[in-house]
Structure formats: C-alpha cells, structure tokens
Image: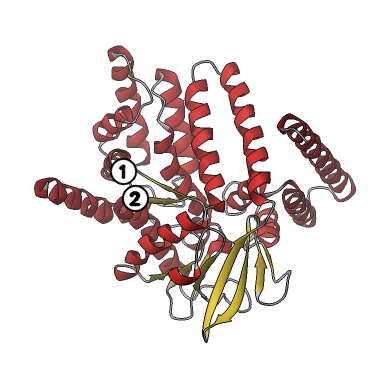
Amino acid sequence: MSSAARSAVRIAQVAVVVCATAASLAWAVVRHGRREGTLRRAGAVVSAALWRLGPAFIKVGQMLSSRRDILPAAFCEELEEGLARGRAGAGGADVEIGSVATVERRLVNGADVAVKTVHPTAAEQLRIDLGLITAMARVAGVLLRRSGPTLERVVHEMCESVRGQTDLVAEAATLSRLEDLELVLPVVFPRVLPGQSGPDVLTMTWIPGQAGGRRFRDPRRTAKRLVLTVYEMLFITGVVHCDLHPGNWWELPDGRLAIVDAGFTYELDEEMRTHFTEFFLGMSSGNAEICATHALAAAARPVPPEAEKAFRRDMEGLIGSVTGLTAGAFSLAGFAARFFAVQRRHQAFSRAEFIFPLMALLAIEGQVKQLDPGINFQSLAGPVVLRSIVARARAERVR
C-alpha cells in the first residue's frame, strides 16, 4: 500500500473513532445529565478512544489528565487511571504496556531490571499520525497568515520529539545525563545497563512503584521537590521533560521522587537555555524589561522598532500582574495564553524551542496545584536560575 493510501485509511480510522466517541459522550449526557458519574464515564470513553487512536493521541490525553485546574477532577481521575503508565499489568504483574513501548521486569544475572522494547508497529504508526498532524498544522498555517510559519515550526519540533520516543539509544543517553540530578535533589532515575542496551532494547535498573496507588506523606514537600526537579532539568541540565504525567513519576517510601521515563524529552541549546533562564529570572523578580529583551531575542524573526516598543509596554503590564502570585492564584496556562496574545499582537512570535520549557511546566502545573495550592513558582525558581547564570558566567571565563 502506498504512503498516500495508508494516510487516507488512517484519516478514515481517526474520523470513525472521533465520531463514535462523540456519540457515546452525547448519549451519556442525555441519559445521566452532567453528574460526577457522567464525567467519570466520559473519562473512560475518552481514554479508550485515545488507546484506539494510538501513541500520538495518547500523549495528548496524558498531559490533559494532569490538568485538574482546568478540567473536572472526576474526568481527569478516570483519564489518568486509563492512561497512566499504559495498560499496567496487561501482560502480567511484571509487564507494563505503554503507548509506544513495553516494559518488562526481569531477573538478569541476578539483578532486578526493567527491559524496554518499542512496539513493532509504533514507529510506523507515529510516522503516519505525526504526518497527519503536521499536515493539519500546515493547513492551519495558511489560514493563520501572521502566526502560520511559527505554528508550523512549533508543531514540527513537537512531532520530532514525540517521534524520538522510539529512539532507545537517545533515551539511554538522556537518562545517563539526568543521573547528576541525584547529587543535588532527592530524586532517582533508572540506571542504564550499557552492555545490555542498544537500538532495539533499553535495559535499566528496576524501580518499584507505589503499592496501593499514588499517595504522598507530605504533599507540600512533594510539590516543592517536583517543581525543583523540573527547574533543575530546565535551567541546569538543559533537558526539557515534556511527559511528567502521573504515570511517569511517584514517591518512594524514603521520600525521594522516582522518574522512570525519558522518552519524550527535548534538549535546549545553550542560546535558547540562556534566553529562557533570563526570561524566568525577570518573571520571578518582576523585571519586565529582562523578560521582554529575552523574549524578543528568541523571536522567530526580527521585530520592527515601533512594534518592539509596544511589545515591551505590554510585557510590563503582564509581568506586573503575575509577580509574587501563589500557585493557587497563578495560572501558567493563563499566563502563557496572555503572553502569546502579546506576541501575536506585535508579531513577535517565539521560535519553537522557546515553547518546550513552557510545555514541561504546564505538564506539572495541575499536579502541583493539587498537592499544594500555596506554592510559589517564582520564588522557587530564583535560586536555581541564579545558579545557572553563575555557572554559565564561569564557563565563559574559562573559555
């Protein structure tokens, strides 16, 4: 079958699933009304539909499952249960079947290990689905004349990152880099066993999950540790983890956070890490001028002088409105929407690389708000951001 024919068949499959799902949801509302039970039913229906649609769609659902601040809690809980850590145990107690790969617990040379293999059809299905998503972004780019080129580039970078989940060699390298975080934070990552890993298999140390479901002895402490871990990744390591949904991290009995998947990540280059770090420094300190300067430096194309003046003026209003807010009052999704609106107004569109750190923070925002509504994102970022800036300054002097 030709590529065009496969794509046509896939489009038809997606259309059938979407229509069937919409009909099921409509019937549930008609029959039961908008009660909590209906929301749970909706979560179950949607998660089942996402499994039928495949890995690219599952990733969207996994991110949505953490957004209890935007979506109904009952819906998110059911969606999380349906998608988190894949169909855990579907092949037995020691086998977890995820959207892209299967992880099996085994004894190898007396060691307890996790062996990850990509589903045989995952790469091809991702290729087709991401091709469809890219095509839709291209069509949207034609309709959205001003922001079209930036939208296409962002979607392209996102698709490449999702496609990278089938690259086990790259995931092994990322896990090895993240091990350094264990020296500064109470967090643990699987150790890669190099002699038993390669392009087709990733063998890692096994990290036990939480018996009896997710729970936290000190939710506020857990929220702080999760935020600091993401900040350390973004500002120090330069690795953007876009997939920290509840199935990919949990708390160990000793209080450390276990993070077990590094397939959906993006590595920032030095220039973009500098711009995002300085932007966040300006945001946490209420300095709109710094934010505007680095947002403009990360723009996809130069901004005319008059538009730049107006952009800086609008950024002053935006940053002033969020400085010092707690997690309960501060919405990253709301901030991002307003920030992008300012960019659109003055055609100061960000390069795709500037969007990924925001995605990483959006992936945990709902979870953090649930654990500790009073946490302050900006104040926690300050010390990590300053340490990143000092480290870069020292590196520049050495050069």
Q: Are marks 2 and 1 in contact (CB under 8 Å)?
A: yes
List x then y, in percent, for residue 121. Answer: 69, 51
Q: Which residue does the image show at 71% across and 33% down from the upper left?
A: 3
* Residue 70 placement (x, y as % from top left): 59, 46
361 sits to left or right of 297: right
Q: Quadrant of residue 347?
A: top left
Residue at x 49%, y 47% (from the top left corner) = 362
The amino acid on which the numbered mark 1 sits, given as a three-letter code, is Arg
Query: What residue is rendered at 53% in x and 34% in y?
Result: 155
Residue located farthest toward the left when viewing the structure as drawn: 397
Looking at the image, residue 344 lies above or below residue 5: above
Q: Distance of mark 2 from mark 1, alpha carbons?
A: 7 Å
Q: Is residue 246 above or below residue 330?
A: below
Q: Is residue 203 above or below residue 235?
A: below
Q: Residue at x 14, y 45 (%)?
A: 396
Reading the image, the residue beneath label 1 is 273
Secondary structure under tag 1 reads helix
| Circle 2 SS class | loop
Write down the quadrant of residue 82 in the picture.
Answer: bottom right
